[in-house]
Amino acid sequence: MEWRDYGTFLSEHFSFKVQKISVNAGFSCPNRDGSKGGGGCTYCNNQSFNPDYCSPRQSVTEQLEQGKRFFGRKYKDMRYLAYFQAYTNTYDDEQHLLELYNEALDVPDVVGLVIATRPDCMPDALLRSLAHLKRRAWVMVEYGAETACDRTLALINRCHTWGDTVDAVNRTATAGIECGAHFILGLPGEGIDDMMHTVDAINALPLSTVKFHQLQVIRGTRLARQLQAGEAVIMRWSVEEYAQVCAQVLRRLRPDIAVERFVSQSPDSLLIFPRWGLKNYQFMNLLRSSLRGN
């Protein structure tokens, strides 16, 4: 069994090779600044997935140019998507947001935007502006949904519901904007049935892409402290067991949805668990073996 991958999805939109460059524009989140909650998601340490060149001390342009130099060494004719990744990238004054998005598109060879945000942070007015921005460049919104289980969302301090995700994805698709979503497998208290419930809920939405990755326990997070104190329970999979879970997800996932990834790897200095130590291609070999029933 093969699945629809992200490269295939991008090839349907671009006639040339594109690479995402992460941008940290210095935003916060409503579950960090007190407007909905404090402390952020229990598992979150943004350092764990921000590249070294990603710093809000640098302008959007400087971050993109640095990213271009990094990727340009490997691919001479690459074009780029500005990936507003860190925290909630629609959580600010609309005019300021549009200035940052347009600054990114002014950088040579940047041909589109991928905007990561929360499903409770997409006002209709901004969606209309993004639909207008589509006349200039390719635009995609990526919602951090994490799970379809409201019980889990409360437990991890997301401060939004699955209903918020359903509403945001439907409004984004209606606005004619490509839409993706991000999910974590193995969140505290969840079993296989919960994860399969999330896949069924994904299938009911007009999503173009999804990301899955394993729950990672990161130093300095509330989750790490909860686990140490015995206040949280998580699935402690081996990498082979996790590959089997991903195979179950793929067998159930709607086949037209492109899957961008199944694993994430935080810096070794921050990661507590799981410490599998596999390269991405090695995990993909395990996944294909699981799909064959080996």
Image (cartoon, rainbow, N blue to C red):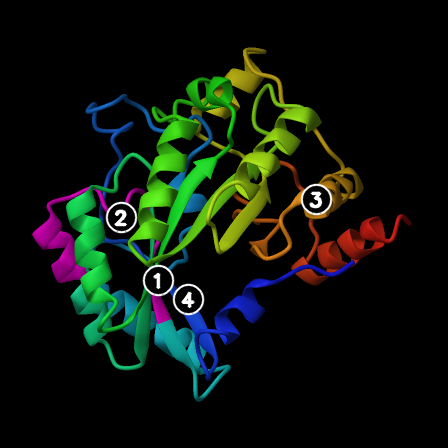
Read off the residue under disc 4: 20
Q: Earlier in the sequence, mark 3 or mark 1?
A: 1
Marks 4/2: CA distance?
15 Å
What amino acid is found at the position of numbered circle 4 in the picture? Lys
225 relative to 95 in the view: left or right? right
Where residue 246 sits, quadrant-wise, is top right
On residue 246, the disc is 3
Read off the residue under disc 2: 89
Tell which of 55 and 119 is nearer to you: 119
Q: Are marks 3 and 1 in contact (CB under 8 Å)?
A: no
Which label sits in the foreground, 3 or 1?
3
Name the residue at 69% across, 50% down.
277
Which label sits in the foreground, 2 or 1?
2
What amino acid is found at the position of numbered circle 1 in the picture? Tyr
What amino acid is found at the position of numbered circle 2 in the picture? Asn
On residue 155, the disc is none
Q: Earlier in the sequence, mark 4 or mark 2?
A: 4
Marks 3/1: CA distance?
31 Å
Secondary structure at badge 3 equals helix
What amino acid is found at the position of numbered circle 3 in the picture? Cys
**Outermost residue to the bottom:** 76
**Outermost residue to the left:** 95
Q: Are there few (<14), some (14-19), or many (20+) residues within 10 Å of tag 2? A: many
Q: Are there few (<14), some (14-19), or many (20+) residues within 10 Å of tag 4? A: some
279 relative to 168 in the view: left or right? right
Which label sits in the foreground, 3 or 4?
3
Extent of the magenta region: 81-100
Name the residue at 32% across, 75% down.
111
- Compared to residue 13, the image places residue 85 above or below, namely above
